[in-house]
Image (cartoon, rainbow, N blue to C red):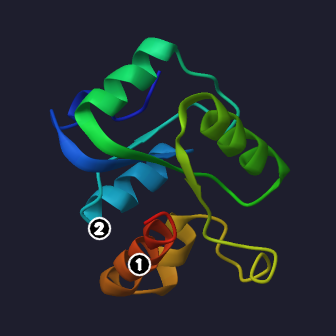
Amino acid sequence: IFQGWDQLPERGEFIIITKSLKDVMVLRTLGFISVALQNEITSIKDTVAHELYERFNDVYILNDFDLTGVIGANKLKKKYGFKPIFLQSFKTRNNGYKDISDFRLKHTNQESKLLIYKLLEKWK
């Protein structure tokens, strides 16, 4: 079950799947279409993945940069082609920003939007 599924538009350029309703709310205030899984290792049905690709050109997954988050994102990448993005990397994993809601607390909307677009750009 996706948190925020019922509020999705019929179509969009892309969607970001994240790990919490809190992050969905932050992403939506920034103008991004988003839903959340129950947790970072939740599996989804093939029919749901198919519907996402019917409605959105690209599907990104934004998990925490920890073992659970990376394993979950890579599992969805391998099975469905979802594109993993992470706020942290090995260089920045101690920057204090575990997720987009943490980042947004200390940065403006514009800075937060730019960060997300920068992460998405790596897949272009």
Q: Residue furthest left?
A: 10
10 Å crowding of disc 2: few (<14), some (14-19), many (20+) = some
Q: Does residue 7 appear left or right of residue 24 in this picture?
A: left
**What amino acid type should be assigned to the residue bearing mark 2?**
Leu
Q: Are marks 2 and 1 in contact (CB under 8 Å)?
A: yes
Q: Is residue 5 visible?
A: no
Q: Nearer the viewer, residue 21 or 12?
A: 12
Question: Which residue is disc 1 drawn over?
Answer: 112
Tell me the SS state at disc 2: loop
Q: Nearer the viewer, residue 44 or 24?
A: 44
Residue at x-position 50% and y-position 15%: 46
Q: Nearer the viewer, residue 47 or 113?
A: 47
Q: Of marks 2 and 1, which one's residue comes earlier in the chain?
A: 2
Query: Considering only vertical position in the picture, is 93 above or below 36?
Result: below
Residue at x-position 35% and y-position 76%: 113
Residue 124 in picture, x, y percent from top left:
43, 66
Residue 100 in picture, x, y percent from top left:
51, 66
Residue 57 in picture, x, y percent from top left:
30, 44
Question: Which residue is disc 2 drawn over?
Answer: 30
Tell me the SS state at disc 1: helix
Residue at x-position 36% and y-position 60%: 27
**What amino acid type should be assigned to the residue bearing mark 1?**
Ser
Q: Is residue 38 visible?
A: yes
Residue 43 in picture, x, y percent from top left:
63, 23
Q: Does residue 116 appear left or right of residue 68 in this picture?
A: left
Residue at x-position 72% and y-position 83%: 95
Q: Nearer the viewer, residue 105 or 27?
A: 27
Q: CA distance from mark 2 to mark 1?
A: 8 Å
